[in-house]
Amino acid sequence: MEFPFLPLKDGNSIPLMGFGIGTARYKEDPENPLTRDLFDILKATIERHFRHIDVSNAYGTEKELDYVDLYLLHSPYLAKKPSSLQQISLSVEQVKASGRGKYFRVSNHQRPHIEEILKVATIMPVLNQLEFHSYLQCAHEYLPWRRAYGVEVTGFNGLTPITKARPGPLDDIIAEIAARHQVPGNAVLISWQIAQNVVVTTTTTKFGRLEDCAVAVQPKLSREEQEKITQVGLTHHFRA
């Protein structure tokens, strides 16, 4: 299964399905012995055509990593004032200048944070990683504004409506759509997110669930199905 791609402003593109290393295999020190199960599942993801791997040096699993396509500024909240955030973003631009990263992206940045970066940026972040799902549609107002500046969205916790927010108003709707397309409920939510052109970041420690990711990009939700999930989701706010 080949995953769809999202075009970026400069003509390049990013896979709309990403695999996150996650915190489940966190190590205190990357000098520790090789995490064999992580090696094995990453090998399996690549064999299943994943080309977007989401990592963090905080997980202690990146001893040999010396280049990234996307360098992530994880949080704006360590900056105590706007000028500090601006200085941090300019420092991140040096990663691209050094050749160690092709693009830079941010995470958990709200509109005021992006506006401060815009005042000084010579290189705009191409992505903002946020919690995004049908019960937390930051994209409904904020996403169009970001896209005007070429900033797309990577979503995490996309399965929240069926993993953490039950019971909820979408329970029966997701089940009905899943039955119609003969796919599991997680495939419906991932397909809805991809239809919004929001990059999906998923993770698992179970090899069998990697197959679910391939299934997840198969259902093509109708506009009516997409709109129903969107509108009903907007009636219920939930943050994981």
Image: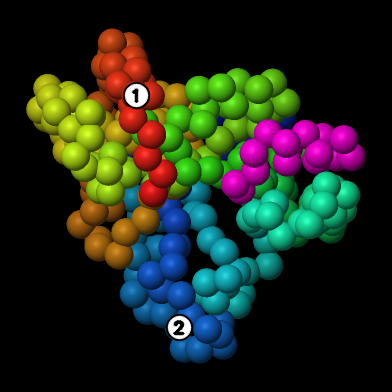
> Within 10 angstroms of label 1, few (less than 14), some, or many (20 or more) residues?
few
Q: Amino acid at mark 1?
A: Thr
Residue 181, how many percent across, how many down? 15, 25
6 or 132, which lies in front? 132
Residue 118 forms part of the magenta stretch: yes
Of marks 2 and 1, the one in the foreground: 1
User: How many circles with numbers are drawn on the protein?
Assistant: 2
* Local secondary structure at mark 1: loop
Q: Residue at x 82, y 52 (%)?
A: 81
Q: Earlier in the sequence, mark 2 or mark 1?
A: 2
Residue 106, how many percent across, how many down? 66, 47
Q: Which residues are magenta?
A: 107-121
> Within 10 angstroms of label 2, few (less than 14), some, or many (20 or more) residues?
few
Residue under label 1, please give it: 235
Q: Residue at x 50, y 49 (%)?
A: 52
Residue under label 2, please give it: 34
